[in-house]
Each structure stands twice: as C-alpha cells, then as structure tokens.
C-alpha cells in the first residue's frame, strides 16, 4: 500500500501542499493554521535555521540572512541577467560557484539555491506528516511552465535533498487546469493566466473527452507580484526623499519594513479603493525620529504598475498565435497566482478574452490541488481524466558551426517525445565531434542556455561531411532531457542524462540530504492538525 503523495506548489513567495482525501484534492494546513507557507528561510545568530512563517517574522531584524525568492535563482547561472538583476537588490549576498552556478552567502560555507529550496520542502514534508499522521515519501512537484531543463532538474534535486521521492514534475498552469477540470468536468479551450510572486505564465489547452492537451505556453521569469511590490517601494522611497530628504536605500532593515508594508498595501487595494501606509519610527536623524504615513489609492497603484500588466499581454497574443486560436475561441479563463487578485489584471483579462474569468477558483491553492490530482492520475484513480499531454516550453537542439543552433525539438512539442537528426563532420579526418546541447529560442547558440556537452570519439577518418552522426533528444513526462549521439558507421554511442553544465552531481545531492530538520519546525509541527 502506497503512503500519501504530496502535491507541492513550491512558489517564489509562498508554497502550498495538498493531498488526496478519498479521491478529492485537499490543501494541507501548516502549523500556523494557514494553507500558504512563506518560501522563506532564515539563519539566526543563535545558529538556528527557521523556515516559513517563523523565518518571515524575523526578516526585518535579520535581513541579510533571511532568504526569500530563491526560486528566481534556482538552476540559473550567476552570470544570467535575471540573477544579476536580483543581485543588485536582494539584501542577501550572491556569489558565483566554481561551475558558474549561484551560491548564497549566509556566513560560513555558502549554500546553493537547491539547499534553500530543500529546507522549504523539508519543512512542508514535516508539517504534512504531522497533519496526516503518516510518513510521506512521495511527491508531485510543480514548476513554472517556462522553466528550462536546469531549473527543473535543480528543483527535483532540491526535493531529493529534502528526502522526497519525486514521482512527477509538472507545470504549474497544467496542474491548475487539472484541478479546475476535475471539479467542473470542463471541456473546450481554456487559458490559464498565472501570475504569482515571481513569474508569469500563460498556457492554452484543449480539454476534450478527459484528455488535457496543452497547446502552447509562454512565460516571463521576471514578472510577478514582487515587481508590483517594488513599484510601491520605489514610490515610498521617492516620497521619503522628496518630503523628508531621506535616502534609505542602503538600510536593509528599513527596506525590509517598507517592502512588507508595500506588499500589504497592494493586497488591501485589491479589495478597497484606498489604504494607508504607516511606518512609524522608520529612522532617526539629527532632527529626531522620522515617520512615514501616506494614503495610497488603487488608482495610483494602477498608474504605478500599468506597465507591468501591459507586459503580460504580448505573451498572451504570442501563445494564442502558436496554438492557432483567437481570443474568442477560448471558452474558459482560469486565473492562477495571488497577483491575479488585482482588479486591474482581472479587468484586462476580461477585456482581452471578452469573457470574465472562471469563478470559484482559488488562485493560491489550485496549483497544489492540481499536483495532488496528478498524483491520483499516476495511481490510476480517475476515470474522467484519462490523459494529460503537456508540451515543451522551449526548443532544444545543438550548437553547429559559427555559433549556430540547430533545433531538434521545437517548442510546444507534446511530451514525452524523442527526435533524432543527422549531423556530420566539418573537417577532413575528424576523429572526434563535440555535441553541445542547448536550450532556448535565440538563434545564436551562445545566447541560449548550455545544457551539456558530449564527446563522440573514434570516428573513422574520412573527408569532411562523410560521417553520419545521429543526435537524439528525449524528453520524459517530467520535461527532463536525455541526449545521445551515435556514429552510424561504428555504432559507437555516447549517452548522458543532461546535467553536467550546471547543477549538483548525484554525489553532492546525497551528501546534502537533510538529516536533521530545524528545531523550530520540530517544536511546532502538529498542534493545528
Ligand atoms: P503566489 O506565488 O501565487 O502565492 O502569489 C503570491 C503573490 O500574490 C505575492 O506577490 C502576493 O503579494 C500576491 N497577492 C496575494 N494576494 C493578493 C491580493 N489580494 N492582491 C494582489 N496581490 C496579491
């Protein structure tokens, strides 16, 4: 008998877990009594590791050792533009790893984003076990649809470090559509508009006869709730400068207080037309204590953030085009991610598709609920969902001459899939070919994400162009990639599961496996179960 399987939505700002309770997906409540757990890890001066609400609560007094939004870093290179942008404004410090990945400095040995995510997942595993009264080993984990290979692999590695056996990695919007589809017996074309704390994803799918066929998906890894918060923070800073002559940008504690107040104000303005941002004793100057108190209206918030909302829609158009649909062909619009509670976003979506989004979908919980539904599909539980056909969100291929890029698998290809293309040598008597697997949409290989290199050796000498090298890419149902290359003449083959260009080795993952959980977690788990 299999134990419970967790469906986990590992979010940028919040995470959520669900399980199947007699075939119905249900959210698991954390020890604080909430469905959503902050994706935050804090390392205290007393040497404690805090995760979730307790970590968030001490963020103001410990800003440099409180890690949040690590999902924006996971599986990326230090040199990645997204990482560099984050680095400029995160209160904690990032470092390059020897292999070019990102490390986080928390005093002592630096840690990887995978380990931080593992602490969050370990925390969820612990409270889920307390809630369910059983040990949990297996999980279905969700990732943004636009996550590439390295980000998927790194997320999976984080789960392994946390002691979870990952049965499946699925895309967040796909999970949301499953949760929605199961509860409504939905059919027809649907759009999932997903804006969470850190990222935006748009996915179009067709539901018919219990088959969920994803048609196309696109995303922006730098468009989410945090960007809205930042607009408010910038406004507060500007007001402080203008009216108080204060420049507080370098003051981590003050900045953390402003960030928290901004996020709270943003949430309130989804339900009210005006709110007050009140920050007493913000700082002390020669003139005495400085306080901040100002009214922020929904109208002003909308003016401050309209450009962010506008950035989402070209991607929606692109995705419609890729799936061959017009806005009017979309029968159901599902909103996912806390940021979609903003009325400006709902209004834009309604106007764009010419119909109101589906009611009764909880934008925070539907991804975790869908992950739990996926666990039921894997167990063969449902008759009404027979098949889930997801697609690749980015093309895959290999580097060719002059920094060129030959695609082998196009984006929006249904997975699992396997494609082979034939390549040849560029020089006479070439004995070795180096196959460089890359992922991305840029025409130059160097502008795409490098996945791995494979050397195929022992080619039979001959004129340029005489060798016949078959390169095969396979993508499994988790969206994870395997590349192989075969010399047709000698039958010699090289095969690797993509990984080496970044990420942790199997040995490193084993070494990091969480053996002891943080004290705060252990003390509290249970009571509210
Ligand atoms: P998620 O990752 O889906 O939990 O989304 C979290 C994001 O949604 C955060 O940036 C929150 O600030 C934002 N959010 C949550 N509730 C609201 C709300 N009522 N109005 C606007 N944004 C919200």
Image (spheres, rainbow, N blue to C red):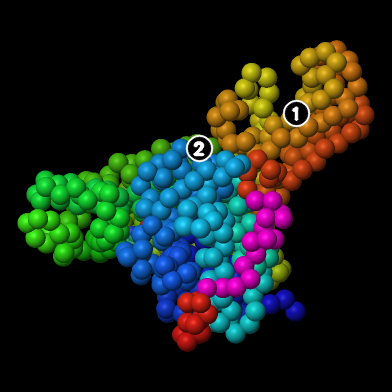
Image quadrant for the N terminus? Answer: bottom right
Vertical position of residue 38 compared to residue 320: above or below: below
- Residue at the extreme left of the image, as rendered: 287
Residue 80 in the image: state x and y as whole percent. 50, 38
| Magenta-tinted stretch | 504-518
Residue 442 in the image: state x and y as whole percent. 55, 29
Q: Which mark is residue 79?
A: 2
Residue 494 in the image: state x and y as whole percent. 82, 37
Q: In which quarter of the image is residue 402?
A: top right
Residue 55 is a magenta residue = no
x 45%, y 65%: residue: 43
- Ligand 1 positioned in quadrant: bottom left
Mark 2 CB in 8 Å range of ligand 1? no
Vertical position of residue 430 compared to residue 278: above or below: above
Residue 328 in the image: state x and y as whole percent. 43, 45
Q: Name the residue under label 1.
A: 434
In this orientation, does residue 481 appear?
yes
x 31%, y 64%: residue: 60
The residue mark sitting in front, 1 or 2, is 2
């Amino acid at each position: 008998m299999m134990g419970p399987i967790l469906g986990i939505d590992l979010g940028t700002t919040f995470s959520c877990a669900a399980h199947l309770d007699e075939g119905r997906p249900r959210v698991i409540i954390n020890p604080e009594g909430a469905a959503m757990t902050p994706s935050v890890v804090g390392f205290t001066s007393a040497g404690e590791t805090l995760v979730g609400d307790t970590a968030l609560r001490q963020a103001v007094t410990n800003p440099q050792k409180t890690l949040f939004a690590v999902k924006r870093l996971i599986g990326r290179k230090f040199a990645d533009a997204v990482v560099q942008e984050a680095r400029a404004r995160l209160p904690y410090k990032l470092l390059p790893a020897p292999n070019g990945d990102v490390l986080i400095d928390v005093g002592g040995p630096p840690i990887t984003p995978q380990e931080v995510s593992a602490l969050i997942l370990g925390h969820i595993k612990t409270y889920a076990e307390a809630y369910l009264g059983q040990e949990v080993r297996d999980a279905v984990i969700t990732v943004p649809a636009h996550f590439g290979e390295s980000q998927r692999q790194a997320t999976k590695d984080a789960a392994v470090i946390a002691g979870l056996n990952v049965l499946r990695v699925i895309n967040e919007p796909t999970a949301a559509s499953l949760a929605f589809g199961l509860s409504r017996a939905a059919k027809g074309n649907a759009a999932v508009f997903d804006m969470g704390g850190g990222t935006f994803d748009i996915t179009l799918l067709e539901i018919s006869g219990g088959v969920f066929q994803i048609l196309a998906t696109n995303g922006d890894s730098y468009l989410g709730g945090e960007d809205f918060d930042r607009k408010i923070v910038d406004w507060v800073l500007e007001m402080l400068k203008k009216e108080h002559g204060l420049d507080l940008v370098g003051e981590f504690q003050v900045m953390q207080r402003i960030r928290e107040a901004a996020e709270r104000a943003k949430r309130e303005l989804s339900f009210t037309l005006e709110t007050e941002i009140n920050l007493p004793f913000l700082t002390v100057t020669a003139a005495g204590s400085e306080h901040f108190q100002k009214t922020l209206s929904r109208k002003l918030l909308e003016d401050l953030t309209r450009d962010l909302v506008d950035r989402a829609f070209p991607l929606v158009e692109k995705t419609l085009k890729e799936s061959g649909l017009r806005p009017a062909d979309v029968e159901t619009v599902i909103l996912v991610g806390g940021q979609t509670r903003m009325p400006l976003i709902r209004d834009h979506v309604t106007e764009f598709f010419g119909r109101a989004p589906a009611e009764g979908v909880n934008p925070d919980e539907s991804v975790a609920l869908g992950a739990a539904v996926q666990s039921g599909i894997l167990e063969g539980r449902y008759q009404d969902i027979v098949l889930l056909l997801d697609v690749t969100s980015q093309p895959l291929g290999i580097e060719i001459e002059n920094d060129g890029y030959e695609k082998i698998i196009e984006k929006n290809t249904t997975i699992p899939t396997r494609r082979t293309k034939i390549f040849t040598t560029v020089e006479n008597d070439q004995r070795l070919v180096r196959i460089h697997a890359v992922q991305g949409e840029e025409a130059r290989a160097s502008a795409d994400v490098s996945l791995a290199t494979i050397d195929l050796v022992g080619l039979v000498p001959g004129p340029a162009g005489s060798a016949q090298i078959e390169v095969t890419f396979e993508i499994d149902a988790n969206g994870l990639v395997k590349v192989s290359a075969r010399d047709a003449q000698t039958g010699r083959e090289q095969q690797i599961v993509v990984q080496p260009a970044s990420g942790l080795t199997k040995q490193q993952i084993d070494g990091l496996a969480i053996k002891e959980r943080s004290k705060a977690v252990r003390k509290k788990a249970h009571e509210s179960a």
